[in-house]
Image (spheres, grey):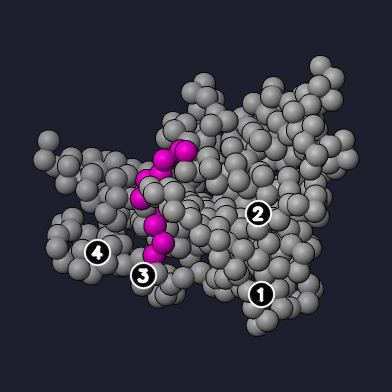
């Protein structure tokens, strides 16, 4: 198959042409996360012929991923997402270079990864990773394509591009309030597909740089896919931004792993059998007062997030629960970071506990 034939349908666009295709073939992209956003973004970037693509994701393919992470198939369960994605993308386009890194992007390795690529795709779903991506992008002078979904809502923006604002100009710090993730609120695959695909399009626009292209630099596109009502908001650059107003060498990278996968899950039945474990309810006080598991102790996630960490004996076996199992995962990570390593999350939370008792 000749290269020109493969890309014929995009080369005939006057905005792309041979010149644009040449730029695409010389470009390199780092995609952080091969999840709901990363999968569609990677599919279209690979198909378009980006010369070198790197995928970094520490996670493995789980059955609940298949509903939206369209690169993976049922026979890849348990496999590294980065490797599984590479396999699929190589089959789609063997003419380009694809690298898989089955590791977590952290404050230690981020700078090195970013320096080796032109553009970063943010396929992450938590503030800690997004801040790390933003701060590293500024430190290394790379644009990054931000995407975010929650329920039926999607957001898209291009940060640190062409003198435009950064993610911290919009969100200087992580909100104190609990932000639910997709595991708690649910998500339809197509919503992630639209945002991830749009991230690929923004990257291609920046690479080709045709005068008619207007990347979302300094803009935030939001869409509610229940109605398709959408808005294009202007984002001003904050001259007091905690990151992009600083000199590059003053920017200190920080990262707290929000990793859910490293916290073992435990069923309500198993929880009931662990008589010696310390059971902690991390819901808010009104939820606790309305009913909780007998023998549990109450430490709200909001308390932990404010930095009020109780000192629990490091050798204790701890089982955390919330209403559905999402908030307790976050709480587990916080306690883990404070030295409580023998920690599990009760799958399905208090709801599952009640359901298990009533069957
Ligand atoms: Zn900024």
> Residue at the spot x=36%, y=70% of the render?
302
Q: Position of residue 128 (x, y in %)?
A: 56, 62
Q: Which residue is mark 1?
A: 237
The response on whether ligand 1 sits within 8 Å of label 1 is: yes
CB-based contact (under 8 Å), mark 2 and mark 1: no
The response on whether ligand 1 sits within 8 Å of label 2 is: no
For numbered disc 1, what is the local secondary structure?
A: loop
Callout 1 crowding tier (Cα within 10 Å): few <14, some 14–19, many ≥20:
some
Q: Nearer the viewer, residue 265 or 197?
A: 197
Q: Which residue is mark 2?
A: 145
Q: Which residue is mark 3?
A: 302
Image position of 267 with respect to 108: above or below: above
Say whether disc 3 or disc 2 marks the residue closer to the N-terminus: 2
Quadrant where the N terminus sits is: top right
Say whether disc 2 or disc 1 marks the residue closer to the N-terminus: 2
Res. 37 image quadrant: top right
In the image, which residues are magenta? 178-190
Task: Indicate which disc residue 189 carries.
Answer: none
Res. 158 image quadrant: bottom right
The CA distance from mark 4 to mark 3 is: 15 Å
> Residue at the spot x=47%, y=38% of the render?
190
* Front: mark 4 or 2: 2
* Front: mark 3 or 1: 1
> Residue at the spot x=81%, y=22% of the render?
5
Q: Nearer the viewer, residue 95 or 129?
A: 95
Q: Which residue is mark 4?
A: 297
Residue 112 can be seen, yes or no: no
């Amino acid at each position: 198959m000749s290269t020109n034939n493969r890309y014929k349908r995009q080369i005939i666009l006057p905005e792309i042409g041979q010149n644009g295709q040449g730029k695409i073939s010389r470009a390199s992209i780092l995609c952080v996360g091969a999840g709901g956003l990363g999968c569609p973004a990677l599919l279209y970037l690979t198909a378009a012929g980006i010369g070198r693509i790197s995928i970094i994701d520490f996670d493995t393919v789980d059955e609940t991923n298949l509903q939206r992470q369209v690169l993976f198939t049922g026979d890849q369960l348990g496999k590294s997402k980065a490797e599984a994605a590479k396999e699929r993308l190589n089959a789609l386009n063997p003419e380009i270079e694809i690298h898989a890194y089955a590791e977590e992007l952290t404050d230690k390795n981020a700078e090195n990864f970013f320096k080796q690529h032109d553009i970063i795709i943010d396929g992450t779903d938590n503030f800690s990773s997004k801040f790390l991506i933003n701060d590293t992008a500024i430190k290394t002078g790379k644009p990054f394509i931000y995407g975010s979904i929650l329920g039926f809502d999607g957001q898209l923006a291009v940060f640190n591009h062409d003198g435009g604002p950064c993610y911290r100009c919009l969100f200087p710090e992580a909100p104190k309030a609990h932000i639910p993730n997709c595991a708690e609120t649910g998500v339809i695959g197509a919503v992630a597909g639209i945002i991830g695909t749009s991230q690929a399009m923004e990257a291609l626009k920046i690479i080709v740089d045709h005068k008619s292209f207007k990347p979302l630099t300094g803009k935030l596109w939001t869409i509610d896919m229940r109605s398709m009502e959408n808005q294009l908001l202007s984002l001003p650059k904050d001259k007091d931004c905690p990151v992009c107003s600083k000199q590059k060498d003053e920017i200190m990278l920080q990262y707290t792993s929000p990793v859910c996968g490293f916290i073992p899950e435990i069923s309500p039945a198993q929880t009931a059998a662990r008589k010696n474990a310390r059971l902690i309810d991390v819901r808010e006080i009104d939820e606790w007062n309305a009913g909780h598991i007998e023998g549990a102790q109450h430490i709200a996630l909001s308390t932990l997030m404010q930095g009020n960490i109780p000192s629990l004996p490091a050798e204790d076996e701890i089982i955390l629960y919330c209403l559905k199992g999402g908030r307790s995962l976050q709480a587990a990570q916080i306690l883990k970071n404070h030295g409580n390593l023998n920690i599990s999350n009760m799958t399905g939370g208090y709801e599952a506990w009640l359901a298990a008792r009533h069957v």
